[in-house]
Image (tube, coloured by chain):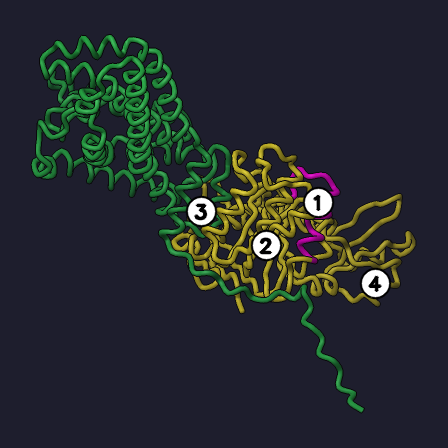
Chain colours: A yellow, B green
Amino acid sequence: MTVIEARGLRKTFGSTVALDGINLRVEEGRILGIIGPNGAGKTTALNAILGLTPYQGEMRVFGRDPWTERDELMRDVAFVADVAVLPRWIKVSQLLEYMVGVHPRFDRAKAEGFLAKTNIRNSNRVRELSKGMVAQLHLALIMAIDARLLVLDEPTLGLDILYRKQFYDSLLNDYFDRSRTIVVTTHQVEEIENILTDVMFINRGRIVLNCSMEELESRYVEVTVHPEQLATARAFKPIQERQVFGRSMLLFDHLERQQLAAFGEVRTPSIADLFVAVISNQAGEAQGAAR
Amino acid sequence: MNMQSSAMPASSTESQVMAPVAISETRRLYWSIRREMWETRSIYIAPLVVAAIFLFGFLLSLLHLPTKMRDALTLSAAQQHQLIEQPYSLAAALIMGTAFVVGLFYSLEALYGERRDRSILFWKSLPVSDLTTVLSKASIPIVVLPLLSFGITVALQFVMLLLSTVALGAAGVDVGPLWREVAIFRSAPMLLYHLVTVHMLWYAPMYAWPLLVSSWARRMVFLWAASPLVAIGVVEKMAFGTSNFGELLLNRISGSMSKLPGTISAPWSHITLGQFLMSPGLWIGLALTAAFLAGAVRMRRYRGPI
């Protein structure tokens, strides 16, 4: 089943193009990571999916138009915009009561179960909690919603490493199953690398790369090349070459692993390395085109 | 031998699709109004504090009450009524005035605060429509505050009456005139009538306008709300040398009490309900209220955190 489907998604702010005709399709049960530099259009894309911003082009989330049907859509969708959006004046007990009052898929007992594992008390106001605890509280609320799509925009921004780890662990262990779909953006790529099923690189409002993790693993290979093989290896046109501890690491796209094994040690690049390679290549091409 | 394996209980981690509870829009509206009361506690605290202060002053005045009552008995019936009844009208006016001011300040903040503290992103992640949200915020000054001021006023007047009775009884003064002139059970429905006609219906556009501005302005909501009104007044004065707009505003607040269904002490004396319901001012005001609120609903959809 298709959860999100967008065609020619476009959004401009004055003369700035935030989204430049994006086509997007997310199937049920996937965990998609959207990765891009600051100002690439990640948040704009998520806001469009969530009905927080108007856009040009076509978009359907669970068959609904997010911009005109946000409130109906939010019965099936949950999102964490960033950690600081819970109102500071509210009490935890009031939050729970309100959620029960307005949300048809909110399970209070479940939320209280998650909160029991933390130091958050029902009588606490949000302003009394630390940043990490607010994130825990928000996550507890979100995980107690039986949503079919969860959208996370930099959910762990500004949290220390313990909370970040905990956040993704509980998300994966207590929440995710094959009937749910998660879309997540973050700058800490290495933390979500292992949980993603799909990855999308976005730069200057365009999708630069969009593939499943299996595809990515079979497609991209990084080789630590023996110095004597360097010239031969370069002839295969790596998309990037960098020096690590005096050794050359070459990144190849669409080449056979066995073939490359002759040049040196072969491994799958990390998403962060691949991201840097793809984005800087794109920047280089753009400069070349400008000349 | 029966080798049939025992059925394994379904793993608890396996998520079961929870049957969603049906939630009506009325229920969402109710909870959203309660949310507003949680956030802005001054909605009920301010009138309660004013009532408490007034009661304290009234307690001090009880010392002179027996003398005052003895003097009052020598006066004419009308003067007697005025003298005895006065503190009770004053109490009502104070509470209603407080509610009015609280309502104005609340409206200026209502759709602005959630954008300033970014909590709008949380509220918008819940299945509550912009319409329900705006209606819940509009009903605080237009419905909740008038009803609250009714309840608080009647309770305050009742306590005042009881205390006076005790004070007079202790001094051996007849309480008959007091209970005759301060007939709470007769004045309460009139007070409610005044609150519904004036504070709910007639004042509605005065709250809807700041609500609209608060949904739109990025800063200085009060200035944005006030300056167009001042500007229209100034332009009118420059262009035509008249000040009709200013008078219109003043009338809306208090000036044309004669054209409204009554004052607090004598609600029925000036105008009948029929005349009030037929007045164009009422309907123009309600039409403006609807337009302002519709604008606010639309703005809330477009505006994000500041």
Q: CA distance from mark 4 to mark 2?
A: 55 Å
Name the N-terminal-most of marks 4 and 1.
1
Question: Quadrant location of the C terminus of chain A?
Answer: top right
Measuring 64% from the left and 36% from the top, which residue is drawn there? A131
Crowding near pointer 4: few (<14 within 10 Å), some, many (20+)? some
Which residue does the numbered mark 1 point to in the structure image? A164
Is residue B259 toward the left or the right of residue A193 in the image?
left
Marks 1 & 2 on one chain: yes
Amino acid type for the residue under numbered disc 2:
Ala
For the stretch drawn in magenta, what is the main secondary structure? Answer: helix
The reply to whether the C-beta atoms of the residues labelled 4 and 2 are less than 8 Å apart is no
Q: Position of residue A248 (x, y in %)?
A: 85, 49
In this figure, which residue is indicated by the disc labeled 2?
A109
Residue toward you, A83 or B83: B83
- Is residue A168 in the magenta section? yes
Residue numbers of the magenta segment: A156-173
Residue with the mark numbered 3: A53
Q: Check if residue A38 falls in the magenta segment.
A: no
Amino acid beneath label 3: Thr
Which label lies toward us, 4 or 1? Answer: 1
Q: Taking A2 as reference, is B302 above or below it?
A: above
Q: Which of the two discs, 4 and 2, labels the residue nearer the N terminus? A: 2
Determine whether, in the image, residue B218 is placed left or right of residue A40: left
Q: Report the residue marked by disc 4.
A: A260
> Chain letter of disc 4?
A
Badge 3: how crowded within 10 Å, few (<14), some, or many (20+)?
A: some
Which chain hosts label 3? Answer: A
